[in-house]
Image: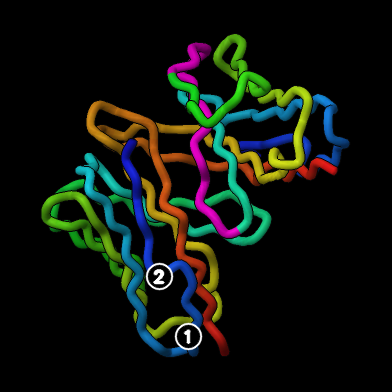
Amino acid sequence: TQLLEQSPQFLSIQEGENLTVYCNSSSVFSSLQWYRQEPGEGPVLLVTVVTGGEVKKLKRLTFQFGDARKDSSLHITAAQPGDTGLYLCAGEGAGAQKLVFGQGTRLTINP
Amino acid sequence: DTGVSQDPRHKITKRGQNVTFRCDPISEHNRLYWYRQTLGQGPEFLTYFQNEAQLEKSRLLSDRFSAERPKGSFSTLEIQRTEQGDSAMYLCASAERQGVVEKLFFGSGTQLSVL
């Protein structure tokens, strides 16, 4: 079974600060995705990374896939209250296997 | 609305009762997933379909759980003889494969409370 560990589980910071959350595994993934989830709603896809070492930017969010395709990070610059939510990483193993999720990082940005 | 829809949004039931949830995926997507999520945790895989074929079922699922996807369109998830531990959000996702990547589009979920 492929497991994804996310850290930290909870993070509460002030508006304007920077932060990084991590997604780690001992398994290699063919791709890794990041989702954001609001209370009472399903997760919404933010980004997909496929190539080892790949970096993608989405406005103030920067996503990186580890060189060995076993880990990923999400960096948010100048966090805003609207960034508050549950951030989930999800990985797909080789051979078009099912997508498995980490336990999530609950992020709170205080005004 | 052409997204994924789930019905009902909320279900309260008594222990021992049977419940059934429905998911209508995005019409052109041939893969459909069911996940379960408890408070503060990530979605936990239950099962998934490619068209009408159920490809995999989690070993965490007891035989009280069954899912179907007749004709490869909508799907239903039934829980028989519900237990308090079944209380959770049940999420359905419709999947689109783009090359090597499968992207999931989630519904808003069905929140189950077993009393």
Q: Which of A105 and A56 is in front in this view?
A: A105
Question: Which quarter of the picture shows residue B5?
Answer: top right
Residue B19 versus residue A68 in the image, above or below:
above
Q: At label 1, which amino acid type do we have?
A: Ile
Q: Quadrant of the N terminus of chain B?
A: top right
Determine which residue is flagged by label 1.
A13
Q: What's the magenta region?
A: B40-55
Determine which residue is flagged by label 2.
A8
- Chain ID at mark 1: A
Q: Residue B57 at x, y = what percent?
A: 49, 23
Give the mark nearer the N terminus: 2 vs 1. 2
Q: Residue A46 at x, y = what percent?
A: 41, 56
The CA distance from mark 2 to mark 1 is 12 Å
Q: Quadrant of the C terminus of chain B?
A: top right
Residue name at image x 58 percent, y 30 percent: B25
Residue A20 versus residue B86 in the image, above or below:
below
Q: Nearer the viewer, residue B1 or B25?
A: B25
Q: Does the magenta stretch include residue A15?
A: no
**Side of A55 where B33 appears, left or right:** right
Residue name at image x 68 percent, y 45 percent: B88
Q: Residue A2 carries which label?
A: none
Q: At label 2, which amino acid type do we have?
A: Pro
Mark 1 element type:
strand
Residue name at image x 60 percent, y 40 percent: B91
Residue name at image x 42 percent, y 47 percent: A101
Residue B54 versus residue A92 in the image, above or below:
above
Can residue A35 be seen at all in this image of the molecule? no
Q: Which of A102 and B83 is in front in this view?
A: B83
Mark 2 Cα shell of 10 Å, populated few (<14), some (14-19), many (≥20): some
**Side of A28 where B49 appears, left or right:** right
**Side of B51 where B20 appears, left or right:** right
Q: Which of marks 2 and 1 is in front?
A: 2
